[in-house]
Amino acid sequence: MAYHLFEVAGIELEYMLVKKANFKVNPIVDQLLTKKNGSLTSDIDNGKIEWSNELVNHVVEIKTNGPVESLEGLEDLFQDNVIEINSLLEEFATVLMPGASHPLMNPDTETRLWQHHYSKIYALYNRIFDCRGHGWSNVQSMHINLPFSGDDEFEKLHAAVRILLPIIPGLAASSPVLDGKHTGFKDTRMHFYKSNQKEIPHMTGKVIPEQVFSKAEYYEKIFDPINEALKPFDTDHLLDHHFVNSRGAIARFDRNAIEIRVIDIQENPSADVAIAAFIIETLKLLVSEELVSLEDQKSWHEDALFDIFNEVIINAENTLITDQKYLALFDIEKAADVKIIWRKLFSRVKENLSENHAKHIDFILQNGSLATRILKAIRNDFSEKNILGVYKKMAICLQENRMFRP
């Protein structure tokens, strides 16, 4: 079935499994899915939510089981599934941990790829890129899938998404600590994302997608170069261009949707779904051309947007934006930090958000991104004991659906 702009949405959330005793990652997603299903499977239909495996065996994905017409109340469905998964994991002395990166994982020694369904694809990825790296095996994100019907709707949605991508880490960054230290990035996940696939640069491009606004143009400028670059590596023809396109937002013409991928996972589903709802309402505002014309949105080259994005992944909401042309898109006249932009957007769309979603966005805008709150809680004490104490509190926030306060 073809859906029109903003008629439905799909949300995907990823969480890592960690041992309760020492909080090391625990690669037992296959055992979790077997315990739930009775036999091993890579996907479990759990009513309105579906569970599935990921590239590595310590990450589980829970997602809407097909498109949903409204995000209102979706956080409760996700929370019910988090509680059920944690209940199943008790037998293994394991718990789900939120946040986009594990602060102490050693990917060289702790990475275990999924060995079951689709394992040939994952093995090929590992052969090409070596997935024993933070950017591959130590990343958890939220994906938002939004539909379009035909080139006209794709053009509007792709133009709006490209404009918004650079500042999304200012709202959602949650990966400031790796290898037991502050990395210098609040969104380290996206820092690795930029160069993860350096062996085949066409796959990621500049993270911000190119100025392509029709299906034919997308194939010509993105998919065809990807397929050409893959040929020497994928001799068995295992990979599909939809699957390997790794830009920060990807076009899925197989299901007529754009999937946004630059959003770090938060401390609980309420925060994730609120961020998704806020982003969707902001995209509606951009598509309406109330702020800026479609032609002006389309005029932005990916290099200029990437330069802004590259700054935002360092300081998140505290990044000072000085590009007057970009600020003008949001009706801001002088240099402003990213949280000012998001506050202005919030004031424009707040009335379209549910009370619960607005409450959670207000909390983030008042208290900072999860990355900022993590660093405040650590208070410059990067001892293993202190870091683990902070992340154990986050795991409790996930189980109890509470916001993380430093």
Image (cartoon, helix red, strand yellow):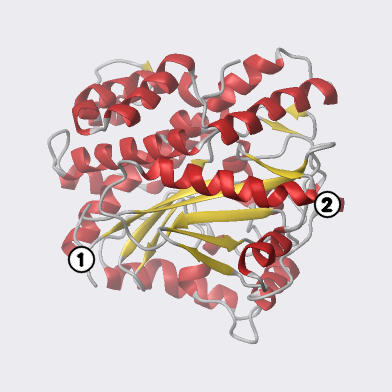
Give the vertical position of 32 relative to 37 (above or below): above
User: What amino acid type is highlighted by mark number 2?
Assistant: Glu
Image quadrant where residue 258 sits: bottom left
Task: From the image, tell me which residue sits under label 1.
Answer: 149
- Percent of width and height locating residue 392: 71, 29
* Frontmost residue, 310 versus 115: 115
Label 2: state its secondary structure. helix
In the image, taking residue 21 as reference, residue 376 lies left or right, namely left
Which badge, 2 or 1, comes first in the chain's sequence? 2
Q: Which one is nearer the viewer's eye here, 221 or 19?
A: 19
Q: Who's the residue at 73% across and 59% down the image?
A: 131
From the viewer's perspective, is 267 left or right of 77?
right
Residue 269 on image: x %, y %? 48, 39
The residue depicted at 73 percent of the width and 46 percent of the height is 90
Q: Which residue is mark 2?
A: 110
Residue 265, image x, y percentages: 54, 40
**Viewed as shown, does residue 350 lie left or right of 139?**
left
Amino acid carrying label 1: it is Ser
Q: Residue at x 63, y 75 (%)?
A: 118
Quadrant of image for the C terminus? top right
